[in-house]
């Protein structure tokens, strides 16, 4: 059984000082917690200082994005090699906010996944349907397209985690129902089996979308849910500690 994986996505929140204050409070409460893996994805500006604290813990340093080239004239971008050098282990790729505000499409996402894996980084690959897709009964079709295009010629299932994040559940307080999560996770598992065969089981599938200390236990009990990606509720050390200790 793979360890449950619980990842904080801090998005564009917290100064370096605020990030360190969070860790001061969070680390002692969660020390010695066995059987689950915790990750924190701070902003790029906090990566180095957060990484220096996490190095003395079992918490994994994650990044929220990476570019697909390792160096060059790409103003404003950060490369997989730079993240690796800072001690990053996992990179979130294809988050719906990247798709929406920064126009990342499946092709760009696929290039980013290739670049991260080539650098020895693990990838948390986000997929999920919009409300319109769901209302038009297109959820599975969308998930299939995102998986097939995003994972094109990616042959390293051991480096992959998938985060199923229905766009309509992110930051809205609306959580997908148990049945919706169950169906989507099973569909994703079956897609992975078609691509990777038995090795599909090496890929953990996380749920993301309005996870809180109140709903974590029931979400974790759903088949094929091997962890969660948490935005809003990960910003508060006490709330995030309750989630990881569910
Ligand atoms: C996310 O950003 O991936 C997310 C799931 O956010 P929230 O928990 O706030 O819905």
Image (cartoon, helix red, strand yellow):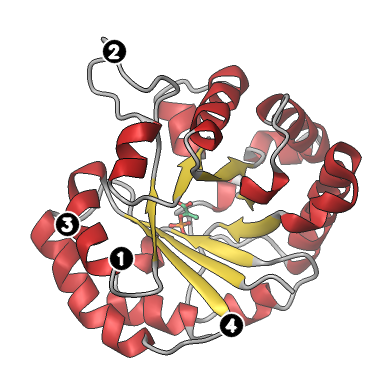
Q: Residue at x 62, y 47 (%)?
A: 159
Q: Residue at x 29, y 67 (%)?
A: 54
In three-dimensional space, the C-alpha distance between marks 3 and 2, rounded to whole angstroms, equals 25 Å
Residue 215 visible in the shown view:
no
| Front position in the image: 43 or 133 | 43
Quarter of the picture containing the N terminus is bottom right
Spatial CA distance of label 4 from label 3 is: 26 Å
Q: Which residue is mark 3?
A: 49
Q: Residues within 10 Å of mark 2 (few under 14, many from 20)?
A: few
The spot of residue 61 in percent (x, y) is: 36, 57
Secondary structure of the residue carrying tag 3 is helix
Label 1 and label 4: CA atoms lie apart by: 23 Å
The mark that comes first in sequence, 1 or 3, is 3
Say if 111 sits above or below 226 in the image.
Answer: above
Nearest to the eye among marks 1 and 4: give it: 4
Q: Quadrant of residue 234?
A: bottom left
Q: Which residue is mark 2?
A: 72
| Residue 13 vertical position relative to residue 156 in the rendered view, above or below | below
- Determine crowd level at label 1: few under 14, some 14-19, many 20+ residues with C-alpha closer than 10 A: some
Distance from Cα at disc 2 to Cα at disc 1 = 33 Å
Nearer the observer: mark 2 or 1; the answer is: 2
Compute the Cα span from label 1 to label 3.
17 Å
Sequence order check, earlier mark of 2 and 4:
4
Q: Earlier in the sequence, mark 2 or mark 1?
A: 2
Ranked by sequence position, the earlier of labels 4 and 3 is 4
Percent across and percent down for residue 211 are 52, 67
Per the image, the residue denoted by label 1 is 235
Q: Nearer the viewer, residue 141 or 8?
A: 8
Which residue: 90% across, 40% down? 194
């Amino acid at each position: 059984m793979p360890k449950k994986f619980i990842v904080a996505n801090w998005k564009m929140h917290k100064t370096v000082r605020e990030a360190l204050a969070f860790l001061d409070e969070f680390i002692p409460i969660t020390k010695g917690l066995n059987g689950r893996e915790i990750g924190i994805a701070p902003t790029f500006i906090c990566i180095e200082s957060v990484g220096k604290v996490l190095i003395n813990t079992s918490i994994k340093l994650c990044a929220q994005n990476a570019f697909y080239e390792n160096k060059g004239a790409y103003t404003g971008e950060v490369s997989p090699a730079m993240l690796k050098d800072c001690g990053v282990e996992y990179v979130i790729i294809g988050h719906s906010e990247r798709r929406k505000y920064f126009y990342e499409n499946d092709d760009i996402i696929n290039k980013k996944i290739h670049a991260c894996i080539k650098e020895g980084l693990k990838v948390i690959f986000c997929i999920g349907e919009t409300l319109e897709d769901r209302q038009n009964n297109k959820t599975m079709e969308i998930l299939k397209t995102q998986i097939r295009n995003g994972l094109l010629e990616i042959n390293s299932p051991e480096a992959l985690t998938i985060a199923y994040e229905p766009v309509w559940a992110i930051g809205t307080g609306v959580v997908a129902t148990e049945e919706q999560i169950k169906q989507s996770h099973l569909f994703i598992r079956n897609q992975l089996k078609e691509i990777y065969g038995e090795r599909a089981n090496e890929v953990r599938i996380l749920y993301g979308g309005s996870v809180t200390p109140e709903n974590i236990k029931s979400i974790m009990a759903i088949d094929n849910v091997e962890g969660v990606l948490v935005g809003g509720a990960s910003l508060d050390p006490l709330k995030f500690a309750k989630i990881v200790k569910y």
